[in-house]
Amino acid sequence: MGTLKIACVGDTMCGDSFYNMGMGVASSLDKYQDTFLSRDIVDILSEHDLVLCNIECVLSDIGRNENSLRSLHMRGRSKTAGYLAKWGVKIAHVANNHILEQGFEAAVDTVQQLEKVGIKVIGTGNDNKFHPSIKPLSITFGTQSISIIGACFHNGKYAFNSNLNTVIQTINDEAAKGNLVIVSVHWGDELIDRPSLWQKQVVQQLVNAGASLVLGHHPHVVQGIDSADNFLVAYSLGNFIFDSHFKGTDWSMILSITISGRRIIRWQAIPIVRGKDYRPALSQGKEKDNLDREIRRRCDILCERIPNLQVYQDEYMSELKTLETKCRRQLWLHIIKNFPRYRPIFWPQILLRPIQRRLGIW
């Protein structure tokens, strides 16, 4: 039986965030186009049979309004799908909390743009039109049949969400066929370096149902990796391409996994950093050594015995609240610093955004 090499990267956001409008990832992509991603990273991805990422935006020009902050926020251009294909992305996960942010038509168009350039899409429902359901992607490498499931456990306003029981039943059904089951899941809390108790409990259910790989995203920072011969869980892969400025979101990893049958033979976390103009770059030298140590530390957290579940959860929630406060402070400092760089038409829209969000109209 041959081996299968899979490369997994995290949140891939190809637009400008509202606080980086005119100077974020989309603007950088307009400048560099398909050379945005460095040759050395493309070469690493090309060594793998499958490359999977989470597309954390729409890639559609439907409804685009150049004078509306709301319309442009986290919106990539449709031609970006071609860049992703050229860089080696084979499978795109789209079940997340931003895919419906520009409406159903733009979401469906995103799927069509990706499929048009040969990228297979997961997390779109049974009909690729985001009607609630789970449809595994079935592919074959040699004699190995693979089922890939895209799920989202996030209750955001624009999320295409999944039912946990349905996901577990789907895993059971696919594993019963003898398939290697991969679950790509959008979940967790932002900016914290470890999973919640709920996530750890859900992972146990997914693995027990027959999942061999569980690949997480949404927190925007790297969390630990737990592995054995028959499974590997990456709780969060961090940001691959993103213009987030929050502390800890400026580095992540390419997770390279080698599988034979349903056994995990080896895995490697390759640290990457956010370079100039939000372009990912391989870490080098002392920086790489430091990130390797930090990844190991986050993996070690998963191995620590939890003597008291309530204490763990209380400490987790306390740290999460502190991070959210720091995040809001960093956001406003960033906006104030860059305010003169925004187009004047966006000034009132930026200031009104917090009110719109509280009213539920953003």
Image: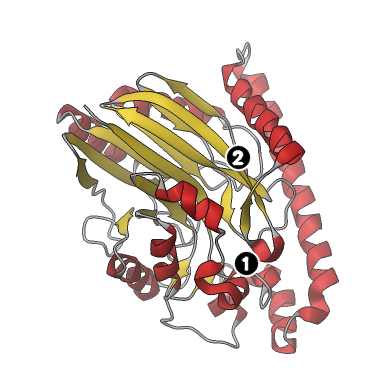
The crowding category of the residue bearing disc 1, from other C-alpha atoms within 10 Å (few below 14, some 14 to 19, many at least 20), is few
Image quarter where the C terminus lies is: bottom right
Q: Position of residue 214 (x, y in %)?
A: 41, 35
Q: Is residue 24 left or right of residue 36?
A: right
Say which element carries label 2. Answer: loop
The alpha-carbon separation of the residues under discs 1 and 2 comes to 27 Å
Q: Which amino acid type corresponds to the residue marked 2 in the rendered image? A: Val
x and y percentages locating residue 304 in the rendered image? 62, 15
Q: Nearer the viewer, residue 56 or 312?
A: 56
Eye-nearest disc, 1 or 2: 2
How crowded pointer 2 is (Cα within 10 Å; few <14, some 14-19, many 20+) is rated as many
User: What's the amino acid at mark 1?
Assistant: Arg
Question: For this view, does 230 lie left or right of residue 200?
Answer: left
Say if residue 35 shows up in the picture: yes
Give how far across and how far down residue 336 sits, in percent. Answer: 84, 70
Residue beneath the point at 69% across and 70% down: 20
Mark 1 or mark 2: which comes first in sequence?
A: 2
Report the front residue among 147 and 335.
Answer: 147
Mark 1 lies on a secondary structure that is helix
Residue wearing tag 1: 357
Q: Which mark is residue 37?
A: none
Residue 318 visible in this rendered orientation of the protein: no
Q: Residue at x 75, y 82 (%)?
A: 347
**Which residue is painted at 49% across and 59% down in the image?**
56
Q: Tell me where residue 209 sits by quadrant.
A: top left
Q: Nearer the viewer, residue 110 or 271?
A: 271
Residue for badge 2: 222
